[in-house]
Amino acid sequence: MANLYLLTDKALDELKKDIKVEKYQQNEPFIEEQFRGRQYKSLIEARIDIADLPELEVKEKSEELLWIQDYKNAIELHKVINSKNVHLRYLVDERFWSYLTHTKYWEYMNKRWYPNDKEHIERNWFFKGGNTVFSRHPLVRLWWRAECSYDERLEDPYELTKVAFDFADPFNQIIERRISKSRKVFKAALIALRDTPNSQKLKGDENRTKFGKAINTIAGVKLIELMSEEELVKMFTEQIDYIVGNK
């Protein structure tokens, strides 16, 4: 069995109840010291070891745009952490991702999402936010966008992943709604964003708000799960065209 872990329920509860900002601002993780002599992690079934997990890079914004860094990190993370190597039940488990934020990815979290206050820690080192977890928790956000946009039919299977990060703000309008759990809908939206002229205009505040309202309209279609990918792409494209003024 490979060596990959998640936090125990008791350890997760203890960490969440005893959040001290200064501990999260340290250069080195504190979890081993806090639980010295006590069990705080459980081995899970996986095809990978923790040593197989990639390093995630953090550069200055002047060197490389943040969304490009996130896109590249998402690909590296997903190449190792995916449903072929780790069972899906762990990939949606707070204990798994919180273990990684407190161990392997401590340095990444500290550099990319410096912990300024307790609420920031609750949202980024743990799961807080209901449906917004998949768009806001740093590691889950990277993995989920790559997992749902990965498409083996394409020459570059991660082509749509780049779109998901390029359109990060408007795409949150989809992720934070129930329809994002359908990979078919998710991919259809990405294809529409990739192929529709002037779709970059959705990044503006006003158009982003309009796009959110359009997503509510699309989510209200009763038979959306039964629609083909082509039909979904057409529906998203029509909404984008209307918003950005193509028609």
Image (cartoon, rainbow, N blue to C red):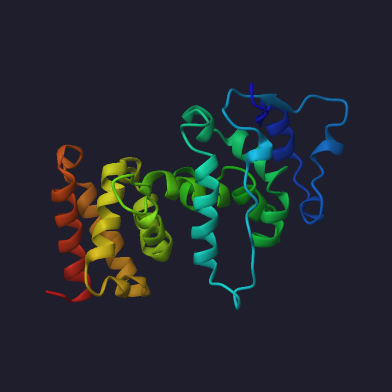
User: Is residue 45 positioned above or below 235 on the image?
Assistant: above
Quadrant position of residue 10: top right
Q: Depth check: 46 or 223 in front?
A: 46
Q: How many labels does the image show?
A: 0
Expressed as whole percent of the image width and height from the top left, the position of residue 115 reads 70, 58
Quadrant position of residue 58: bottom right
User: Is residue 239 positioned above or below 52 on the image?
Assistant: below
Q: Residue at x 25, y 75 (%)?
A: 198
Q: Residue at x 36, y 54 (%)?
A: 156
Expressed as whole percent of the image width and height from the top left, the position of residue 33 reads 87, 38
Q: Depth check: 174 or 17 in front?
A: 174
User: Is residue 179 positioned above or below 192 on the image?
Assistant: above
Left or right placement of residue 82 versus residue 154 in this view: right
Q: Which residue is drawn at 40% across and 53% down?
A: 158
Quadrant containing the N terminus is top right
Expressed as whole percent of the image width and height from the top left, the position of residue 147 reads 42, 44
